[in-house]
Amino acid sequence: MHQPLSLTELQALLGRVFSAEALAEWGLLLGCVALAALLSWVLSRKATKREHSVLFGDRVIDGALFPLLALALAFGVRRLLPLWELTPALFKLALPVLVSLAVIRVIARVLRAAWPDSAPIRLVERAGSWVMWGGAVLWITGLLPVILDELDDIGWKFGTVKLTLRNIIEGGLTAALVLVVALWISAAIESRLLRRDSMDLSMRKIAASAIRALLLFVGLLFALSAAGIDLTALGVLGGALGVGLGFGLQKLAANYVSGFVILAERSLRIGDMVRVDGFEGRVTDIKTRYTVIRSLGGKEAIVPNEMLITQRVENSSLADPRVLLNTVVQVDYDCDLEAVMKSLASAVTDVPRVLSEPGPSVQLSRFADSGIELTVFFWIADPENGSGGVRSDVNLAVWRTLKRLGVDIPYPQQVQRQPKSESSTTR
């Protein structure tokens, strides 16, 4: 067992680290760090995607690969020091520091890849960093085994099972490590799936969500087993969870099930223009619990997936992205109606975003009080860009055409009659 260092022994170790005899160790350690940085940079140049990368991070050296390579190289050199007749002093301090740095970088990058913009995750990162650096200090000074022995003496007995504080801490750390590895694997698989263009985006989303859920479930089972928890007790927990889902969590469970149904049936896809409960916009993301719809005005609606299953949803681009729009105008009764209708259809065809096949058409809607009402129908193929702009362009084209033909747009006319006075009717 690693005996704790006394203050004198610690001072002697630090004295050897900064002595002339340790210059060779300094050179070897700096060489390991430089070689690790060089290898990380070379591998990052060959990587196809570095955004939210666990291995490379944002600046290569802030990823997990750099400390892992430095640790591996330093451990190998530490084994070779006796062959070179060198007494390890610096590497006794460097290896625990590199181990702590590697673990911190792995945990931090994995959590940021899984939850990119989460404030609680940042707090978890800081807490984990303090724990790891504290463990490194205890390891260097040799106090860690002593503290673990003391924690082993603090325990509780539940029936035939004895649980100590050391077991709880070690099991918690092991469980956290297993879950981090599961998150790392699921983030890597999800990143590869979302980059595949051969598969529909909605199917990629459902595959990524299912793989993450499966890996986290398997990781949770391994973590509970590593923490010393009997997995047979999960049968009772599963029964209680089923009762909870049947009563208190039925809405939440319905939203999750509806999310997988939507993604599997592809009734809604990312990019579709939909109208739900009077809100119209483009589907920007489909989660397992809710769907995000963004209107053309910038507002976003978070719609529970159950609503998309149980209520009517208008999808403008499910089978065919083409959408029929119309605008109404009145013309004078004295105009050449057939020539005006033909000229309007030709003018609307030249408007950008208006499809030529099927082309615009003009129909006589009704004989109004002030004039003849015409309805101009036209098709567009990009409803995600909105209808206000193209309808305005069509109205301008109609107005210019009527001005060119000398056709008036009639104003509403009213005839007001003066009632006869009482004196004029009575003689």
Image (cartoon, grey):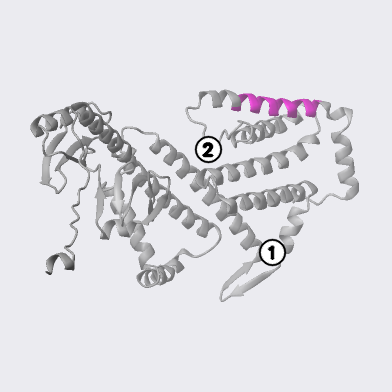
The front one of 50 and 335 is 335
Neighbor class of circle 2 (other Cα within 10 Å; few <14, some 14-19, many 20+) is: some
Q: What is the x, y in percent for residue 235? A: 41, 68
Using the rendered view, name the quadrant where residue 40 is placed. Answer: top right
Look at mark 1 in the image and give the residue it sits on: 152
From the viewer's perspective, tell me whether residue 189 is left or right of residue 337.
right
From the viewer's perspective, tell me whether residue 424 is left or right of residue 25.
left
Instruction: Provide the residue span drawn in magenta.
Output: 24-40
Residue 38 lies within the magenta run:
yes
Which is closer to the viewer, label 1 or label 2? 2
Residue 97: mark in rendering: none
Identified by mark 2, the residue type is: His
Q: Is residue 357 visible?
A: no
Residue 52: mark in rendering: 2
For image coordinates 49% across by 47% down, the residue present is 183
From the viewer's perspective, tell me whether residue 200 is left or right of residue 119.
left
Q: Are marks 1 and 2 in contact (CB under 8 Å)?
A: no
For image coordinates 48% across by 56% down, the residue present is 220
Identified by mark 1, the residue type is: Asp
Q: What is the x, y in percent for residue 33? A: 69, 29
Q: What is the x, y in percent for residue 197? A: 34, 32
For image coordinates 34% across by 46% down, the residue present is 281
For marks 1 and 2, the one nearer the N-term is: 2
How far apart, in angstroms, are the residues tagged by discs 1 and 2?
40 Å
The front one of 213 and 390 is 390
Q: Is residue 340 above or below residue 103?
A: above
Residue projecting furthest to the front = 427
Q: Is residue 59 above or below residue 278?
A: above
Residue 26 lies within the magenta run:
yes
Residue projecting furthest to the right = 8
